[in-house]
Image: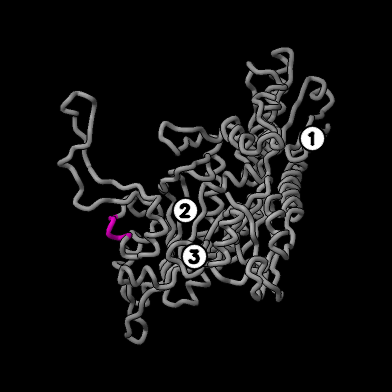
């Protein structure tokens, strides 16, 4: 292998870290808790952005941009919101540096203290609703459907590339509506967009559901989520959509005059996914050889490796590859010909396998003479010889098959680790094995917190589209009546 990685069975956490670095996705930066997303990793994120952005715009959402800095007083206007983010906020207190009088470099200029301290954006509800107040006067101004692609800062103490970093990239949608029903419908619509993207683009099976009160977004009346299971059995919250009610409208006095001339407070939603999806992509599909990328997100869908001994063979094979490449690109398939003459073919094979390229073609002089090409698929590691003539239409269909196979494999893996659990003693043992446990819950925050304190397990969601268990029972912990099972897991 070009760059050896730790086997998953030996150390899953180290396998993940190895893969992030050795597949050229990201690396640590000079700033604690922050990462450098390298070109190959950013290319995957760009494909995610492109698909999601098109889906947002199809739903009527427009992109905008709002300030990175938020006046501290804005946070104090929504008590629950500030309580949810207070421990993670980075605060700007001064606006200038000066030379140290003692000659020890530079120091903060004590005379440059800001009149009001600024919070570096951990999320944008407060700054956006201060702006919406100026945009909204009448029912004719509604709805407002805005999204922004940006970075946010949450001062995490324990970080991990893509999964939890002090700074990360994301999109955050913020919508304003004239009625609760319309806002709730938008929140449901957007979590559906995320679920569709996860399943059909990321090949990631997810469960859609409501968050419990303890797990809701700070300041929301309801949070919808898509929950995924990683190969180690841990849960990953992959995206959320929030019905915010009128909390932020009341905090920032955002009202509109309805068609009858009466003033009403606006109803709100917010929703977002982040570069955490990159972590989900790695952990859901990767293997001991490296990344396994769904074709829909692979920056390079087909890589071609020439095998030759002479300059004449090299030129002839590259000419043949050029023709195949042109036809594939006409079909909308991204292709790279690896014509580097400083590396052996075996090294190239291992490198592209590590980077998760879905299809690899190799051709030597004998293949060229026979009119054939060797084809390897990344998802199954199967290799075979195919006629070079017409290989383009075969690859087009194969990419669809690979996309579906990656999803089916992840779905089978997830479903094999979902099980019902009906007693507290059983729960304490089963939760150690990972996976999702379907258990009865009495609906109280006290029971939920007690279970978390004793086992680290949380309610991932109250499912609405899969694993739905609306049946009478008793809470595994308190023994109180329960109307349905919920999904418990230990999460990243």
Q: How many labels does the image show?
A: 3
Q: Position of residue 33 (x, y in %)?
A: 45, 39
Q: Mark 2 points at which residue?
A: 171
> Between residues 153 and 443, which one lies in front from this camera angle?
443
Tag 1, which secondary structure?
loop
Residue 324: tell me if it is visible.
Answer: no
Q: Whole-Å distance between the Cαs marked 2 and 3?
A: 14 Å
Q: Name the residue under label 3.
A: 242
Residue beneath the point at 69% across and 27% down: 350
Left or right of residue 479, residue 372 in this image = right
Q: Residues within 10 Å of mark 3 (few under 14, many from 20)?
A: many
Q: Position of residue 147 (x, y in %)?
A: 44, 58
Q: Whole-Å distance between the Cαs marked 2 and 1?
A: 44 Å
Tag 2, which secondary structure?
strand
Residue 86 location, quadrant: bottom left
Q: Nearer the viewer, mark 2 or mark 1?
A: 2
Q: Where is residue 358 in the image (x, y as percent from the top left)?
A: 70, 39
Q: What stretch is highlighted in magenta?
A: 71-75
**Dominant SS in magenta:** helix
Among numbered discs 2 and 1, the one appearing first in the sequence: 2
Q: Mark 1 points at which residue?
A: 389
């Amino acid at each position: 292998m070009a760059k050896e990685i730790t086997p998953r069975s030996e150390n899953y956490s180290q396998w993940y870290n190895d893969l992030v670095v050795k597949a050229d996705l990201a690396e640590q930066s000079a700033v604690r808790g922050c990462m450098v997303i390298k070109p190959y990793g950013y290319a995957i994120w760009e494909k995610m952005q492109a698909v999601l952005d098109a889906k947002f715009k199809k739903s009527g959402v427009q992109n905008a941009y709002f300030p990175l800095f938020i006046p501290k007083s804005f946070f104090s206007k929504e008590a629950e919101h500030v309580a949810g983010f207070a421990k993670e906020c980075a605060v700007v207190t001064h606006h200038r540096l000066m030379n140290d009088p003692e000659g020890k470099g530079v120091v903060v200029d004590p005379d440059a203290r800001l009149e009001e301290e600024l919070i570096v954006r951990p999320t944008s509800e407060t700054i956006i609703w201060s702006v919406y107040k100026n945009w909204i006067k009448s029912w004719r101004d509604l709805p407002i459907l805005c999204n922004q692609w940006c970075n946010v800062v949450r001062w995490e103490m324990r970080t991990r590339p893509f999964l939890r970093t002090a700074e990360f990239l994301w999109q955050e949608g913020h919508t304003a509506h004239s009625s609760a029903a319309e806002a709730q419908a938008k929140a449901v619509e957007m979590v559906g967009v995320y679920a569709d993207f996860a399943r059909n683009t990321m090949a990631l099976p997810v469960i859609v559901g409501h968050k419990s009160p303890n797990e809701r977004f700070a300041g929301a009346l309801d949070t919808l989520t898509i929950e995924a299971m990683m190969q180690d059995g841990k849960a990953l919250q992959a995206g959320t959509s929030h019905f915010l009610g009128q909390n932020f409208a009341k905090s920032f006095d955002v009202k509109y005059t309805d068609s009858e001339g009466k003033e009403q407070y606006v109803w709100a939603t917010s929703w977002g996914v982040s570069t955490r999806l990159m972590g989900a992509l790695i952990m859901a599909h990767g293997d001991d050889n490296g990344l396994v990328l769904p074709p829909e997100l692979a920056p390079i869908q087909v890589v071609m490796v020439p095998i030759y001994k002479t300059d004449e063979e090299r030129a002839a094979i590259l000419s043949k590859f050029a023709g195949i490449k042109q036809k594939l690109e006409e079909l909308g398939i991204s292709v790279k010909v690896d014509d580097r003459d400083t590396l052996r073919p075996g090294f190239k094979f291992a490198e592209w396998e590590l980077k998760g390229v879905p299809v690899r073609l190799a051709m030597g002089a004998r293949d060229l003479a026979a009119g054939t090409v060797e084809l390897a698929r990344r998802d199954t590691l199967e290799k075979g010889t195919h006629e070079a003539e017409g290989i383009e239409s075969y690859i087009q269909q194969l990419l669809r098959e690979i996309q579906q196979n990656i999803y089916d494999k992840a779905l089978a893996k997830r479903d094999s680790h979902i099980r019902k659990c009906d007693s507290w003693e059983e729960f304490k043992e089963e939760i150690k094995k990972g996976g999702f446990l379907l258990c009865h819950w009495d609906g109280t925050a006290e029971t939920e917190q007690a279970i978390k304190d004793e086992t680290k397990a949380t309610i991932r969601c109250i499912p609405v589209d899969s694993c739905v268990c609306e049946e009478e029972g008793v809470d595994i912990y308190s023994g109180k009546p329960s109307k349905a099972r919920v999904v418990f897991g230990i999460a990243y």
